[in-house]
Image (tube, rainbow, N blue to C red):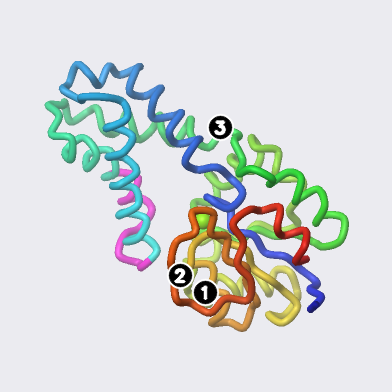
Amino acid sequence: MKKYSHILFDLDHTLWDFERCATETLVELYQTHQLAKLGSSSVEVFCAAFHRVNYRLWDLYNRGEYDSERLRRERFFMVLDELQLEYDSSLPPILAEEYLATCPTKGYVITGAIEVLDRLNQHYPLHIVTNGFSDVQTTKLEYANLSKYFQTVTTSDGSGYRKPNEGIFHHALNRISTVAEECIMIGDNLEADVLGARNVGIDHIYFNPKQENHTATVTHEITSLRELIGIL
Ligand SMILES: [Mg+2]
């Protein structure tokens, strides 16, 4: 089995449990701002609308069609519009601000993350390569007690490039002072993490917990983080 010198991890949905952290934050916002009174049928519908809008916007962001400010500014307008709620235009910016202040402080991680990081950390320098805002990603790492595991954290807004753009990977390799052949990248996004890494010659592990169908050729594929211990 090939030996690597450095392991690169994606953060959201790979180590940090975005789904759980976001949902808990949204439930709090829903209750605090009494969104039911504005015509929202249920908190589940509100959460589902958020995740739909968010997924769409992050896809646009990853393709360079949206910047981070616009994503943050427009996200809750789009959610409330999608639910056809009657709202005051001052509400979405308040929701946006509270969401950003709260969500990154939720410390839920993906099952097995700590156990695997504890183990891998004994044998490899670990790094983060993430499409995200530096301030937000740093907060997530700290509140989830993950900061201590990582020697470098490369973000899209810090590097000026978003995965799958090779610029972010080159930026990370430069910071680590290593080369592509010495590294392996682990992530849940087939395009951003897997194809991105492959395009610069970095081996990769596709974390596919929902066992989504695909036709990509990958170095390794796992459905649980614990499987990493058998691979690395
Ligand atoms: Mg991810």
* Mark 2 or mark 1, earlier in chain: 2
Secondary structure beneath dot 2 equals helix
Question: Mark 2 sits on what residue?
Answer: 191
Question: Mark 1 sits on what residue?
Answer: 196
The amino acid type of the residue labelled 3 equals Lys
Going by the picture, which residue comes out furthest to the right? Answer: 122
CA separation in Å, label 2 and label 1? 6 Å
Above-or-below relation of 37 to 91 = above
- Can you tell which quarter of the image residue 158 is in? bottom right
Q: Residues within 10 Å of mark 2 (few under 14, many from 20)?
A: some
Which callout, 3 or 2, points to the residue nearer the camera? 2
Q: Considering the image in quadrants, where does the N terminus appear?
A: bottom right
Above-or-below relation of 166 to 158 = below
Q: Is mark 1 within 8 Å of ligand 1?
A: no
Q: Residues within 10 Å of mark 1 (few under 14, many from 20)?
A: many
Question: Mark 3 sits on what residue?
Answer: 106
CA separation in Å, label 1 and label 3? 28 Å
Name the spot of residue 147 as percent of width and height, x first. Answer: 71, 45
Name the spot of residue 23 as percent of width and height, x first. Answer: 43, 33
Whether pointer 2 and pointer 1 mark residues with C-beta atoms closer than 8 Å, the reply is: yes
Which residue is drawn at the image coordinates 64% and 60% (left, top)?
Answer: 9
* Mark 1 or mark 3, earlier in chain: 3
Secondary structure beneath dot 1 equals helix
The amino acid type of the residue labelled 2 equals Glu
